[in-house]
Image (tube, rainbow, N blue to C red):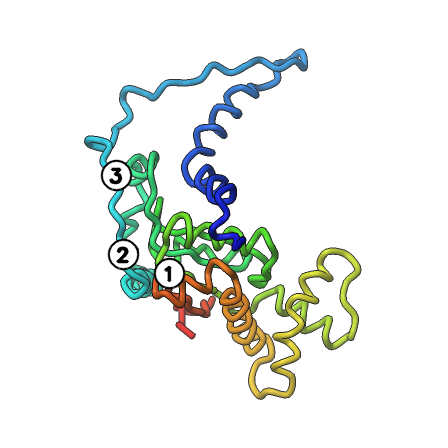
Amino acid sequence: MPRSNDPSRRRFLSTLAGGLGAAGAFALAACGSPNRGGSTTAAVPQTADPSTPTPAGGATVAPLAANGDEALALLVAGNRRFAADHLERADDNVDRRLAVRTSQKPFATILSCVDSRVLVELIFDRGFGDLVVVRSAGEVLDKAVTGSLEFGVAELNTPLLMVLGHQRCGALTAAVGAYDKKKTDADDLGFLEDALSPAVQRIAGKPGDRITNAVLENVALVRDQLRQSPVIGPLESQGKVKLVGAYYNLDNGQVQLL
């Protein structure tokens, strides 16, 4: 049975989408904090501060984009504001945080690197409830990463899926070094280097900056791998998801679509 139609899988993902927030909050409250004697004092669940503003009527959040093209346009416009240092931060405030506390309608799922300089929500001038962001070094895919991306497009229904590489990627730099030495690290870093080696091999002998070439090639390879997903591939074929690659320039803050 295809995974996308497995009832048990659908129930699990639906639980993730709506139920774990409350369960996690309860678990944190129950854990409490250690007192001076080393024992644990159970925390009393806190009620909302009466002075805290609440969203009017508790209305369901409306989707910001009806399709992948509209979603991409929102990201492009937001990045232009970021690169020009004209951030609006319209969804980065208390009102927005409260508005999405019980429901969410993100419009894009983005796979990016773990690099501390690539703050995805910031470089696209977005905020609470706008983006599903999944990170892995060099955008390397494994079951957890791919499953998280599938969750974004299939359960949260984001019409856009972006693979975002970036300038001077440390993971690709390490992969290039391992390729040159003809030896990968023995620990889990070696797993990353092996996963990124196809991109490094494909750009061998290509003119230009090797790291940049490797990053661009890797984005294309990851995008093609995601098309093999039994969840993402059909959604793209049906026009329900737009799958794109992109490259973030650390020097000027601009995102280039590939």
Q: Secondary structure at mark 1?
A: strand
Which three-letter amino acid code belongs to the residue tagged 3? Answer: Thr
**Quick one: label 1, few (<14), some, or many (20+) residues within 10 Å?**
many
Q: Secondary structure at mark 3?
A: loop
Tell me the residue at 76%/67% (across/down).
184
Q: Are marks 3 and 1 in contact (CB under 8 Å)?
A: no
> At which x and y percent is residue 139?
55, 62
> Between marks 3 and 2, how big is the CA–CA gap?
15 Å
Q: Are marks 1 and 2 in contact (CB under 8 Å)?
A: yes
Tag on residue 65? Answer: 2
> At which x and y percent is residue 84?
31, 64
Left or right of residue 133, residue 83 in this image: left
Q: Secondary structure at mark 2?
A: loop
In this view, the residue farthest toward the left is 56
In this view, the residue farthest toward the front is 1
**Quick one: label 3, few (<14), some, or many (20+) residues within 10 Å?**
few
Tell me the residue at 47%/27% (across/down).
25
N-term mark: 3 or 1: 3
**Quick one: label 2, few (<14), some, or many (20+) residues within 10 Å?**
some
- The quarter of the rendered structure image containing the C terminus is bottom left
Residue occupied by mark 3? 60
> At which x and y percent is residue 100?
32, 39
Instruction: Name the residue nearer the viewer: 85 or 57.
Output: 57
Which three-letter amino acid code belongs to the residue tagged 2? Answer: Ala
Residue occupied by mark 1? 160
In this view, the residue farthest toward the top is 37
Left or right of residue 38, residue 65 in this image: left
